[in-house]
């Protein structure tokens, strides 16, 4: 849907914007993956890497915003083109927030306030795998502009929510068993919440793809 | 509490893109295939309005053997701007010229169908075409002031149609028309100078003043800003916005942005057919026909 204009330069600009958002998505996906691994392994070195790369995520977000403003100013896009640009802007914002969640997790490790227990680490790893899978699927759906894949992401977010609720319950049980570990428990709850939020951001990205697809199918149904 | 061999991927440089992603899938490279297979013929959207000035039904225009307008039905509403857009040769100007019977002046032109102005057929043999054109004013692509003074350009119509009884009435009408056209302050001290000595934008506003001086019901505009610079264009667009409070306006434009800025309804023509019509906001955000979508997004034209 992004190509086929009489102006090939416009096609090129739109494709470049799309690719730039996907690049940012790749970086954010890796940030989440590294942050979750750092939390599970309680690895300060990886956490530092995640925090250092946060600037790179912000640079992507800034340049994507600049590209979008320039594209709108130069090309005056309408209809599906305008929707695509706005949708890509929203995807960029969701990725920015997902990156911020990764940074929060990494900072928890860097603060070294207390390492979580084996069970909590296991819960975090499981939740991270679900969240990373959702984000990866959402980015693949964005790459292919595939509404069906996007719908699957939205459906699968329920699994993540259920795992988050179960993990939180187990965490509270452990906290009651060992009140001395309250600070560690609170930090762990924030980490689980961050991973659940990454899944929500993946879901929101998928929602943007679905919205674009709904418009396209409505247009194509007209006799 | 160490974990052995975490299942989360190990540290490494961030990938440029997500692994395995195909950045240029065949579906995208093929262009807007999702919209293909949409036939022309039936108009998408509501062609009628609650309070029409013009009500056109099944209008056909032939220029000799050429079928220029095909079964177009469309209303022009009171106190609103209707924009007509479409690629060159799609029939939008031809349709506009039907509304004040300008096509009558073209040899070989044949117009069929019903066009009602305030409920009366404009093709009624009893109808005076000069009176019709007084009620349906027209502004053309190129400013065409008469080679007369600014005053006389505006006074010409009211004199011709006997709209004023005295010189003071005429003075007042000329003044009011120039004010409504946003030109009064620029020309009030040189009303006796030739209209052709004004700038392009001023000449076009003079033509608009000349049009509204005869108190029309409708103003037709055929690409009124195509020969003007952006500043003059902005002034004309502002003027259109003000005039719509008093007149129905139908404008043909090649500028999609202009149609989006000035109109409340937009009609998209393609190869003589009215493909889609609707509220301008909808047409430019949610067009329902593939051809409309392709044209306004610059995929053909």
Image (cartoon, rainbow, N blue to C red):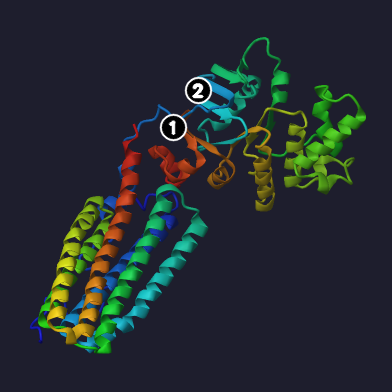
Mark yes or no: residue B103 visible.
Answer: yes
Q: Residue at x 65, y 24 (%)?
A: B100
Residue A210 locus on image (x, y percent): 29, 51
Give the residue displayed 58% in from the left and 30% down from the top: B77
Viewer-nearest residue: A145 or B24? A145
Q: Residue furthest right?
A: B167
At x 67%, y 46%, the residue is B238
Q: State how far apart marks 2 and 1 are (Cα).
A: 27 Å
Looking at the image, residue B162 sits to the left or right of residue B217; the answer is: right
Q: Chain of mark 1?
A: B
Which is nearer the eye, B106 or A148? A148
User: Measuring 91% from the left and 32% from the top, which residue is drawn there?
Assistant: B168
Q: Quadrant of residue B101?
A: top right
Residue A170 position (above or below residue B42): below
Q: Name the secondary structure under disc 1.
A: loop
Residue indicated by mark 1: B45
Q: Chain of mark 2?
A: B
Residue B237 versus residue A174 in the image, above or below = above
State left or right for residue B27 relative to residue A168.
right
Q: Quick one: label 1, few (<14), some, or many (20+) residues within 10 Å? A: some
Mark 2 or mark 1: whose residue is earlier in sequence: 1
Q: Residues within 10 Å of mark 2 (few under 14, many from 20)?
A: few
Q: Which residue carries the number 2 mark? A: B66
Q: As displayed, is residue A107 above or below residue A96?
A: below
């Amino acid at each position: 849907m992004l190509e086929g204009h009489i102006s090939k330069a416009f096609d090129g600009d739109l494709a470049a914007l799309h690719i730039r958002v996907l690049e940012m998505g790749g970086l954010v996906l890796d940030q989440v993956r590294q942050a979750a691994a750092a939390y599970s392994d309680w690895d300060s070195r990886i956490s530092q890497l995640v925090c250092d790369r946060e600037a790179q995520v912000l640079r992507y977000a800034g340049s994507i915003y600049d590209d979008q403003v320039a594209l709108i100013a130069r090309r005056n896009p309408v209809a599906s083109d305008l929707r695509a640009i706005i949708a890509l802007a929203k995807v960029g914002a969701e990725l920015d927030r997902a990156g911020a969640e990764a940074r929060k997790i990494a900072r928890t490790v860097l603060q070294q306030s207390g390492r979580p227990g084996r069970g909590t680490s296991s819960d975090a790893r499981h939740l991270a795998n679900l969240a990373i899978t959702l984000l990866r699927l959402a980015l693949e759906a964005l790459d292919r502009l595939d509404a069906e894949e996007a719908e699957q992401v939205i459906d699968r977010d329920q699994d993540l929510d259920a795992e988050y609720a179960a993990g939180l319950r187990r965490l509270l049980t452990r906290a009651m068993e060992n009140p001395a570990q309250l600070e560690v428990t609170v930090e762990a709850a924030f980490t689980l919440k961050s991973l659940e939020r990454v899944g929500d951001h993946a879901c929101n990205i998928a929602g943007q793809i679905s919205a674009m697809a709904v418009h396209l199918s409505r247009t194509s149904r007209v006799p | 509490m160490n974990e052995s061999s975490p299942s989360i991927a190990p540290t490494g440089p961030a990938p440029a893109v997500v692994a395995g992603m195909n950045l240029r899938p065949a579906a995208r490279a093929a262009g807007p295939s999702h919209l293909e297979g949409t036939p022309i013929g039936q108009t998408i959207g509501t062609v009628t309005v609650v309070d029409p000035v013009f009500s056109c039904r099944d209008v056909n225009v032939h220029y000799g053997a050429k079928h220029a307008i095909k079964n177009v039905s469309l209303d022009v509403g009171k106190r609103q701007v209707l924009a007509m857009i479409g690629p060159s040769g799609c029939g939008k100007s031809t349709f506009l010229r039907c509304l004040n019977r300008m096509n009558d002046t073209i040899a070989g032109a044949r117009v069929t169908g019903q066009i009602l102005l305030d409920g009366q057929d404009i093709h009624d043999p009893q109808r005076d075409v000069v009176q019709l054109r007084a009620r349906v004013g027209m502004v053309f692509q190129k400013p065409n002031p008469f080679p007369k003074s600014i005053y006389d350009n505006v006074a010409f119509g009211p004199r011709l149609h006997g709209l004023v009884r005295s010189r003071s009435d005429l003075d007042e009408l000329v003044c009011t028309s120039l004010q409504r056209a946003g030109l009064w302050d620029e020309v009030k001290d040189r009303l006796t100078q030739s209209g052709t000595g004004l700038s392009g934008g001023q000449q076009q506003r003079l033509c608009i003043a000349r049009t509204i001086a005869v108190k029309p019901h409708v103003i037709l505009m055929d690409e009124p800003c195509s020969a003007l610079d952006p500043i003059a264009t902005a002034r004309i667009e502002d003027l259109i916005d003000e005039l719509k409070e008093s007149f129905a306006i139908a404008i043909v434009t090649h500028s999609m942005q202009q149609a989006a800025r000035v109109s409340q309804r937009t009609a998209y023509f393609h190869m003589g057919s009215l493909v889609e019509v609707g509220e301008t906001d909808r047409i430019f955000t949610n067009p329902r026909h593939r051809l409309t979508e392709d044209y306004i997004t610059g995929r053909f034209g």
